[in-house]
Amino acid sequence: MAGILLVEDDPSVRTGLELALTRQGHSVTSCATGEEALDHVRTRRPEIVILDVMLPGIDGIEVCRRIRKIDSLPVILLTALGDDLDVVVGLEAGADDYVVKPVQPRVLDARIRAILRRVESVPADRLTFGDLVIDRGALKVTLKGKEVHLTPTELRLLLELVRHRDKVLNRRYLLRTVWDHGHVGDSRLVDTCVQRIRAKIEPVPSEPRYIHTVRGFGYRFSPP
């Protein structure tokens, strides 16, 4: 199904997840350190990175930041139960989703497949909003003629907001349609992803022109 890079320093957890994901039909390569992960991304780009936060040497958060400087491939964090700070910092670093340890392989597989659906289900046409151009066929966003590098999740969220232009979309709806979370989920995924998109497409992110917050409800795409 997917070419996965699994980055986990605990040998028993790494072996267990690698076997479980392989049984689900994925092609899994694993490593134990952040340095190995970055080398693999540069030389043998995977489709998805499953990244433990607590790694020896370069930790998972820093690995995610460095991946985002060179690639927009999806990243799912593995984080310990209750480590809310790691979740927030990881999402701000560019992670697309997170799974809490101890990891249930079926949950992780569901998140992987949801990300693949986000990548594959982008409709094709070209949308122009002033300086902002969204080419859904080419999976490309440009601002003033310069390409804006968005992750698949960021692109899918932006497209969902654009599809419902001038309508308010609540966080529960966005979690269901963008992240494919059938339950209520974590609204931080939505809020942090919106912040990342704003940082890339808004001239002044604190005074957004495109993606507006409707307090108590959610977000609305209303271009000037």
Image (cartoon, rainbow, N blue to C red):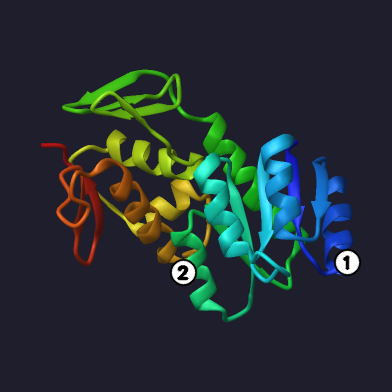
- Residue 47 image position (x, y, % from top left): 67, 38
- Alpha-carbon neighbours of circle 1 within 10 Å: few (<14), some, or many (≥20)? few
Q: Earlier in the sequence, mark 1 or mark 2?
A: 1
Report the side of 55 relative to 66 (left or right). right
The residue nearer to you, when weighing 93 against 117, is 93
Residue drawn at (40%, 64%) of the image: 187
According to the image, label 1 marks what residue? 11
Label 1 sits on a secondary structure element that is: helix
Q: Could you say which disc has been placed on residue 82 in the image?
A: none
| Residue pictured at 82% horizontal, 52% vertical | 30
Q: Which mark is residue 88?
A: 2
Say what secondary structure mark 2 lies in. helix
Q: Is residue 100 visible?
A: yes
Tell me the quadrant of the picture where the N terminus can be found.
top right
- Disc count in the image? 2
* Mark 2 crowd level (few <14, some 14–19, many ≥20, 10 Å Cα): some
Q: CA distance from mark 1 to mark 2?
A: 26 Å
The front one of 153 and 202 is 202
Q: Residue at x 67, y 71 (%)?
A: 54
| Rendering quarter of residue 60 | bottom right
Of the residues shown, which amino acid type is indicated by label 1? Pro
Q: Amino acid at mark 2?
A: Val
Answer left or right for 59 relative to 212.
right
Say above or below: 70 vs 102.
Answer: above
222 over 86 or under it: above or below: above
What residue is at 40 percent from the left and 54 percent from the top? 193
Q: Quadrant of the C terminus?
A: top left
Could you say where residue 73 lies in the image, as x and y percent from the top left?
Answer: 58, 41
Farthest residue in the left direction? 224
